[in-house]
Structure formats: structure tokens, C-alpha cells
Amino acid sequence: MSSHTALSRLITPADPIQGDCRRLDRAFYDRPAETVARDLLGRLLVHDTSSGPRIGRIVEVEAYLGPGDLAAHTSRGRTARTRAMFGPPGHVYVYLIYGMYHCMNVVTGPEGSGTAVLLRALAPVQGLDASTSGPGRLCRAMGISLDHYGIDLCGGTLWLARDDAPAPSEIAASPRIGVDYAGEWADKPLRFFVPDHPAVSRPPRAKKKG
DNA sequence: CGGTCGATGATT
DNA sequence: ATCATCGACCGC
């Protein structure tokens, strides 16, 4: 029937749309957030929507390292909002920011670790009309909202996949964006991106060091 | 540099 | 239950 059935074949090898394209499994996510973050660059984010498939290639991410990381939402303990981020790996943690934008994270590490990777920018691959640079625009273009809170990326209509494209030849790192309140954690190089890629969101300004 | 509004944590 | 505060952002 719908595109759903056809696109579900992306979970199998030798997909016609993107070559050898396969859904990432639980083990991929069950690793430290920083490791997953780097490994996510170049992977595909796929959303099989009622209006057709939307696919983008990840070019910018940020790692959030759990309750000890003062920039992470889990640093203030378990709340209704952070329940999914404390949950098992391979699930989605979405939150609403500034009352208007959504941000999508993939939960990493063992259950209870409270670690995740924020998806910040995609290179459009298929079905994407609007900008996918920046976490809010990424979710808007991909059709991701709180409806996706807590869903499993290892089954269903939203997932991450590998294909036969080569991994990025180089990975750049910088401090994370918008976490100046996080003390020394604000300076840690936990933002990863493909250098000079046009879809990478440009940091507002280089941070001045005293 | 300010809009915009739900979630949060403190408080009743 | 209610309230004041504050954003893991965006567009000017």
C-alpha cells in the first residue's frame, strides 16, 4: 500500500532508494553519547510520513553526557520531560523549546544513563523542502514533534540508517551551542560536524575567552 | 536582539 | 492547584 510499506524496505540491505541502506540497530545506540555522536555523522534520518518519505543526511550533532553534564537536561534529575532521556537507548527524546520549536535527540548508552545526542543539521536527501540547518528547523522540515516523544527508532516510521555512502573524511569539533550557563561544561568540544558543509548551522559567534 | 509560550520548580 | 521564570532557537 502506502509509502510506508515500500519505505520499510530501507531496513533491509540493497534498498533501491539509497543503495545499501539499513536501519541502525540497538547496539549502535548502546554506546557512550560522544561515540554515537561522531558515528551519526553521515547517517540518514528517515521519516516515513503520510505525505511521503523525508530523508536527510546528518552533518551536525551534539553529545549530552548525562546528569553530571551541566548542559544536559538530565542534570536536574528525573522529571516528566526527561523520562525518555533516562530510558533505553535507541529511543527518541523530543522537547519543546521557546514555546515554538522542537528539538530531537537520540537516547544513547545503557538505560538510566541519561545521555543523548541532539541532531542539529541535515543535508537534504529526499522530500525536504524547508531548511534542515539548526535543530528547530530540522524538526520542522522532518515533521518531528512531541508526537514522537519516546518512540523506538529500531521499529516504526522514524529511524536512522546507514547506506553505502562513505563516512565523512573529517570530523570537526567545537563547544556546544547555547549552553553558556553550563560552567566549564559549556567549553567542552561536544559538538561535532562535517567541516565546511553548507548545511551546518553557523555558531552565532565565536566565544571570547578571558 | 527580541518574540513567544510550554515546561519547570517553587510555592499555596 | 497556581505562578514567575527561563530557555540545547530562529529570523531580523
Image (cartoon, coloured by chain):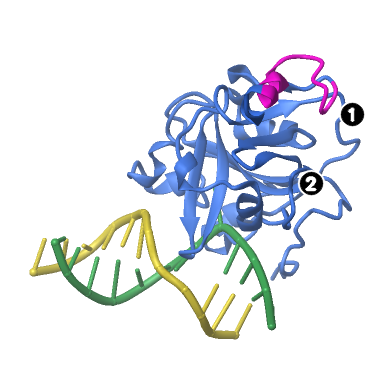
Chain colours: A blue, B yellow, C green
| Residue A75 screen position, x and y as percent | 43, 46
Q: Is residue A22 visible?
A: yes
Which residue is under mark 1? A166
Check disc 1: other Cα within 10 Å, few if <14, some if 14-19, many if 20+: few
Q: Residue at x 83, y 19 (%)?
A: A20
- SS state under label 2: strand
Q: Are marks 1 and 2 on the same chain?
A: yes
Evaluate whether residue A23 shows in this view: no
Residue at position x 81%, y 25% from top? A163
In the image, residue A36 lies in the stretch drawn in magenta: no
- First in sequence: mark 1 vs mark 2: 2
Checking the image for residue A124, the label placed there is 2
The answer to whether A135 appears left or right of A19 in the picture is: left
x, y percent for residue A57: 77, 40
Q: Amino acid at mark 1?
A: Pro
Question: What segment is highlighted magenta in the picture?
Answer: A6-19
Which corner quadrant of the image does residue A43 belong to? top right
